[in-house]
Image: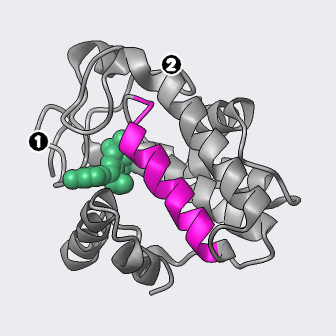
Amino acid sequence: MTDLLDAEPEGATPLTPEEREGLIPAQVTLRRELNELEQQNILEASLWVTGRSRDPVSEAFARNLHRRMFSQVWRWAGDNRTSNKNIGCDYWEIDIQLRGALEDTRTWLAFSSYPADEIAVRFHHRLVAIHPFANGNGRWSRLMGDTLARRLGRPAFSWGNSTLLDDDATRRAYIDGLRAADRHDIGPLLAFARS
Ligand SMILES: Nc1ncnc2c1ncn2[C@@H]1O[C@H](COP(=O)(O)OP(=O)(O)O)[C@@H](O)[C@H]1O
Ligand SMILES: [Mg+2]
């Protein structure tokens, strides 16, 4: 069993020592225990978010959802990260990048620039590329994408039908899809999201 000081699974962002200090439950030492606490917290947030149709394309909603997903586990839930990562923009650009992503998404919606699923997947990709938070960016941005899909009358995505934490092949297909999207080819990520 990996403990919290060991390397993260591939494609997960390592935490800085300060971020680790933001851990609320004092008794947690194992990665598995942390995963379980996060899962429970996320489940509650998922119930809240699916309770009725919600518009996720606002900064207030975006932060609120991350806070609801992780506030029982991380003190910095909903707050911008304060250091740079190997993924994501420079941390001092997070607010401006986030506003740009939300504005672009609102434009796609207003002009029906793409089909509904594609707008929601592009929204997810833009959000996770910014990587606003110290952790939880993948799970938060997928739930953001799901929320927009549902708002547009589509079902939530399956995202490869796995938790992405357990299955290497699924995780690889997902990361490959994100990388293709970085190169302006949304096709593979769009296919993955409904696989
Ligand atoms: N090479 C990459 N390019 C783009 N996005 C990536 C890459 N690797 C990981 N990601 C995204 O970052 C997420 C991991 O970030 P993290 O903040 O740890 O989220 P979580 O804790 O929810 O897994 C992945 O789920 C994926 O969405
Ligand atoms: Mg993580």
- Residue with the mark numbered 2: 75
| 93 horizontally vs 59: left or right | left
| 102 horizontally vs 73: left or right | right
User: Crowdedness of circle 1 by 10 Å Cα count: few (<14), some, many (20+)?
Assistant: few
> Can you see residue 56?
yes
Residue range highlighted in magenta? 117-133
Q: Under tag 1, what secondary structure?
A: loop
> Can you see residue 35?
no
- Classify residue 147 by image quadrant: bottom right
Q: Quadrant of the C terminus?
A: bottom left
* Amino acid type shown at disc 1: Ala
The front one of 39 and 145 is 145
Residue visible at 41% across and 68% down? 163
At which x and y percent is residue 6?
Answer: 11, 38
- Classify residue 66 by image quadrant: top right
Question: What's the CA distance linking mark 1 and mark 2?
Answer: 22 Å
At which x and y percent is residue 25?
Answer: 45, 26
Residue visible at 65% across and 77% down? 115
| 81 horizontally vs 7: left or right | right
At which x and y percent is residue 80?
Answer: 47, 21
* Amino acid type shown at disc 2: Arg
> Is 173 drawn above or below residue 39 in the view shown?
below
Q: Main secondary structure of the magenta part?
A: helix
Q: Is residue 61 one of those drawn in magenta? A: no
At which x and y percent is residue 113?
Answer: 65, 67
Q: Under tag 2, what secondary structure?
A: loop
Q: Please give the label number shown on residue 7.
A: 1
Residue visible at 65% across and 40% down? 103
User: Crowdedness of circle 2 by 10 Å Cα count: few (<14), some, many (20+)?
Assistant: some
The outermost residue toward the right is 52
Q: Is residue 126 one of those drawn in magenta? A: yes
